[in-house]
Image (cartoon, rainbow, N blue to C red):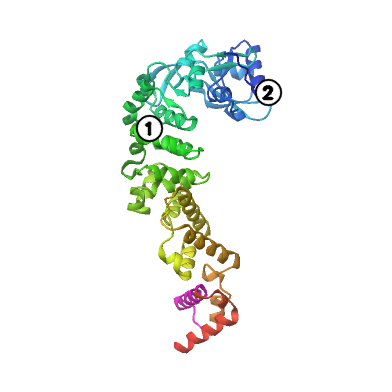
Amino acid sequence: MSVRLEVPGPVRELVERLEEAGFETWTVGGAVRDALRGSPAEREDWDLATRATPKQMRRVFPRTVPLGPAYGTLGIFGSDGVLYEVTTFRHDVVTYGRKAVVAFAETLDEDLSRRDFTVNAMAWHPRRAVLHDPHGGVRDLQAGVLRAVGDPAERFREDYLRVLRGLRFAGALGFEIEPATWAGMTDAVPGLDRLSRERIREELMKVLGGRRPSRTLSLYRRCGALGRVFGEMAPVVGRGALATVDSVRGNHVLRLAALLLFGAGAREGSAAVAELLAGLRFSRDEVERVTVAMSGGLGPGPQLTADPVARRRWVAETGWGGARDVFRVWLAALRAGTCARGEDEVRRVIAAARRDRHAGVPRSVADLAVAGRDLVARGWKPGPGIGRALQRLLEAVWEDPSLNTRAALMEMVGAMEEGR
């Protein structure tokens, strides 16, 4: 196969400097794969493999970043200011299902033979314009097949994260998984329990951040990985769930919220969801955002559609940011055909909430045209009584927003005084 890949100039410069110092160097990995697919990678995704050891690399490049020197990886800045990963040729000595003891290797072939899938085990030499493909990666790329390098069972036992990576690659690229590779994956699924929850979270977020998460999530379901990731909270990933997740536009956190609405996450409530997500090492902000986005379900309840006061109270309790996230989940459910309410009702609730926001309808007592000090000035004693009075005023304004004037509210305060 005659090919020519366009490698960014700063990457070529790094290759040239290492080779001029006497160290064979190639571009490797996902950037080569994507370039062959006609989908150029981001600059920072171009990785290099070299015969130079970290010590030798530091002699060539005085300024480096130790990204993993024990594994042969340094970060080296290109002329464009981008930090590129450069790794010494290496081979595994001992593997533990995630971590490995590695030794530096002499040849590129040794390095490529330890990689996960054939489409990731290709190398391009930008100076010589040579593609090195010892495992048939180009053939599999053209056929749309994901195939493990060498013995699939051995590859997955070396690193169980390869199971999730393989599922993501196949889903994102629309590839078929070669039968022996699929068998090796499914047999290795129990090993996912040995991975750190941080690693699982990272993979899940990459899946949910893709163009069509449904393809990978379907593979998760088929091989049993879904239960290993979510445990007892595993969602029921049917056609409706997959369509809804895909329909959430571009936000991986909201896609996670939509996914968890299909199954135990919706039934068990926010506390159970928060516990699951905390276990997966999501941040507090992410946990809160997911649980709030789930709180609206797959469509507004009858009260929100029929009662303006209930709608305004809900927006006040949820916060505008949270309400907006709920709206995005509802709209995704509408597009997917899984919404619990009709389109007119959903859009009416959303439009009314937006009108309230633009009109400045109060969401808290702080937004009222009067404050506690106004009541104190009339002789009210500071304390909880003032808070209760302001809350009554807020409820009245939710009923009729035109009442949010100083004159109207002070008249209501006078009526309260007469009733005291």
Tell me the tag on residue 46.
none
Judge by depth and name the residue closer to the eye, 394 or 91.
Answer: 394
Secondary structure state at the residue bearing disc 1: loop
Closer to the camera, 265 or 379?
265
Q: Mark 2: which secondary structure?
A: helix
For the stretch drawn in magenta, the main secondary structure is helix
Q: Amino acid at mark 1?
A: Leu
The percent coordinates of residue 375 (x first, y second) are 53, 81
Q: Which residues are magenta?
A: 380-398
For the residue pair 380 and 310, the one nearer the viewer reads as 310
Residue at (34, 36) in percent of width and height? 228
Q: Residue at x 45, y 15 (%)?
A: 113
- The quarter of the rendered structure image containing the C terminus is bottom left
Magenta stretch holds residue 59: no
The quarter of the picture where the N terminus appears is: top right
Is label 1 in contact with label 2 (beta carbons under 8 Å)? Answer: no
Instruction: Give neighbour class at mark 1: few <14, some 14-19, many 20+ (Cα, 10 Å).
Output: some
Q: Residue at x 48, y 49 (%)?
A: 335
Q: Is residue 204 visible?
A: no
Tell me the distance, in whole angstroms, between the alpha carbons under discs 1 and 2: 37 Å
**Is 229 left or right of 417, judged from the image as shown?**
left
Name the residue that disc number 1 marks.
195
- Circle 2 Cα neighbour tier, 10 Å, few/some/many (<14 / 14–19 / ≥20): some
- Asked whether 396 falls inside the magenta stretch, the response is yes
- How far from the left and from the top, in percent, is residue 338? 42, 50
Query: Eyeballing the image, is 331 above or below 230?
Result: below
> Which amino acid lies under the numbered mark 2 shown in the image of this protein?
Gly
Task: Say whether residue 107 is left or right of residue 262.
Answer: right
Q: Is residue 68 visible?
A: yes
Residue under numbered circle 2: 9
